[in-house]
Amino acid sequence: MLYNLKEIVSEGDLCVLSGFFTDDNIEEIMHDGVLGCVKIYHAQFGMCETNVQLSSEAVDQIINNVVAFNGKVLSSSMPLFDGILFDGSRINIVLAPIAVNGPAITIRKFKKQVMTAGDLVNSGVMNSEVCAFLWCCLDGLSHKPANILFSGGTSSGKTTLLNAVSMFIPSRARIVTIEDTPELRLPFSNIVRLETSFEPLIDMDMLLRNTLRMRPDRIIVGEVRGPECKSLFTAMNTGHEGCMGTIHANDARETIEKVVNPPMEVPPVMLKALDLIVMVSRKNIGGTIIRVITEISEMGGVENGVPRLNTIYTFDPNKGELRRTGVPSKIRTKIADACGMAPADFDKILRERTGVIDNLCRLRLDVSGFKKAVDEGNGI
């Protein structure tokens, strides 16, 4: 399919690419070198070619401006670049000779409006009960917040989901985020945002270990993929509750396999501190590709060195929705015990919060309105 850009305007650092930023359905913008047109990924139409081509001069201008804006280094000795644009969109650049056809540019567009958990319910990512369950787990009913990994494939919606449900963290919490490229957009004032660096070399593991000295109430890692995973689990096992991160995997079992194997190498004994794995993926529902939560699983322990998972919610492809499996939830019991209540009392709060979520979904509040309503409902 050909996507015709009717009007190309000059704006900021992106020059002729800026016109693509007017369509919020465009998720990615790609320039693959000198041999073709600019391509996009459109939420409705999928991968599309466009009527836009970039000259080598335009490519050089974009690269120079973006690198200067980020204050980073891009050269033949360091030909890989991750950064952000003026609007917060993520950009990746690969130079020749690694990019055989010339410089390759990939832009993951920044949504103009941060999505709330209510928006995700309205769009079918989850239902109101699952949303209320995550609310109970993230704030821990003010006593035991859960440690959660949000897992899924590339562009499955992991970061969007983490951003949205982070609004269930109490506003008074001190949050430290760790990312390679800033993508998290959390509506908090007491937040420290850390980013890795090439010069000097400061990686995610170094930042995470330093974070433990910053008195964080919550630690959020933008993307777990290396040795920092072990440090994150160390934090979980030493009393830092409410840790969260995203990870690339196709299901909960694969998530655990990646965590315990190189390069993450988390000892199986540490897995007990992980409370939930929330899987999100792209599904074809009625001919439309949408992002949905497909599984919520808990660590069920380790038997003979093999991690065991309990799946408490699973996606029903026949009904196109996430449903309870009937397996008893361990985090439900943990939170109830920490609050000095019976699990049945947790269930009552879950039902009440499901009703609150239903009301918030009908109101379609923006981020500030949704966050305020959640904070006022924290005493439920």
Image (cartoon, rainbow, N blue to C red):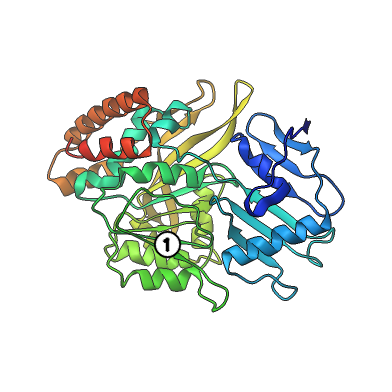
Question: x, y percentage for residue 118?
Answer: 39, 31
Name the residue furthest front: 10
265 to 357, vertically: above or below: below
Q: Above or below — where is 303 with respect to 363?
A: below
What residue sits 25% from the left and 32% below the top? 350
Q: In this orientation, does residue 254 appear?
A: yes
Residue 371 or 289: which is nearer the viewer?
371
Placement of 290 over or under 260, stated as above or below: above
Q: From the viewer's perspective, tell me whether residue 174 is left or right of residue 248.
A: left
Q: Which residue is mark 1?
A: 268
Left or right relative to 238: residue 153 = right
Crowd class of label 1 (few under 14; some 14 to 19; many from 20; radius 10 Å): some
Which amino acid does the dot numbered 1 rest on?
A: Pro
**Residue beneath the point at 42% across and 58% down:** 304
User: In front: 55, or 199?
Assistant: 55
The residue sitting at the bottom extreme is 200
Q: Give the quarter of the figure containing the C terminus.
A: top left
State which quarter of the image contains the N terminus: top right
Closer to the camera in the image, 20 or 277: 20
What residue is shown at x 27% (from left), y 28% (from top)?
Answer: 356
Find residue 165 and report its horizontal and vertical position in percent.
38, 42
Q: Residue at x 27, y 25 (%)?
A: 355
Count of marks, rendered view: 1
Of residues 204 and 185, the one drawn nearer to the viewer in this rendering = 185
Q: Give above or below for 349 relative to 100.
A: above
Asked if one can make out residue 269 in the rendered structure from this viewpoint, the answer is: no
Q: Position of residue 297 (x, y in %)?
A: 41, 43
As helix, strand or loop, the secondary structure at mark 1 comes to helix
Residue furthest out toward the left: 340
Instruction: Answer with the quarter of the image where residue 240 lies.
Output: bottom left
The x and y percentages for residue 86 are: 56, 54
